[in-house]
Amino acid sequence: MTSATIHDIQKTLQCEILHEANTIPLKGVVASGLMSDVLTTEIEDFLLVCNLANSQVVRTAYMVGAPTILVTNAKQVPSDFLELCHEHNINLLRTAYPMYETCVLLGEIFPVTRRSQ
């Protein structure tokens, strides 16, 4: 299984590190604008990619054990979002790329394998 650091992601996506809280290696990616979809994932230590910037994203990341959040579309992050990342020891990154392009570029770090039918 491939793993990556936030610095690998920063280099690939030319993103900002808004809060660096841990060094947990990331083992995969979950990308969604619906936090209810994120709650159904079974993988651990993943990068949560979303185009939302509200406190529910941080609370969801904390609940599922996602050590890093990546916000797309250069969204402004409110202070309560950043404070919750600090409180829950979650890394926070931001990229100007939209969600689709972010996911395509992340495929360079986390290769996709086809699922068996």
Image (spheres, rainbow, N blue to C red):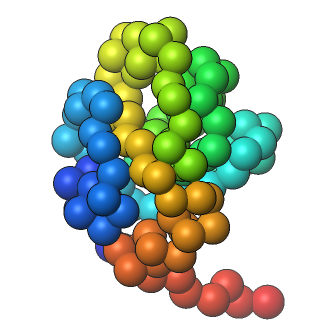
Residue 26 point in image, percent of width and height = 35, 55
Quarter residue 106 falls in: bottom left
Residue 80 visible, this angle: yes
Quarter residue 54 falls in: top right
Up the image or down, 97 lies above or below 72; here it is below
Q: Residue at x 63, y 67 (%)?
A: 100
Closest to the observer, 101 or 23: 101
Q: Residue at x 33, y 23 (%)?
A: 89
For the N terminus, the image quarter is bottom left
Residue 57 point in image, percent of width and height = 61, 29
Q: Residue at x 20, y 54 (%)?
A: 7
Up the image or down, 102 lies above or below 116; here it is above
Q: Residue at x 48, y 36 (%)?
A: 65
Up the image or down, 77 lies above or below 117; here it is above
Up the image or down, 64 lies above or below 48; here it is above
Residue 48 point in image, percent of width and height = 52, 47
Q: Classify residue 52 as left or right of residue 58.
A: right
Residue 15 point in image, percent of width and height = 33, 51
Q: Classify residue 109 as left or right of residue 41.
A: left
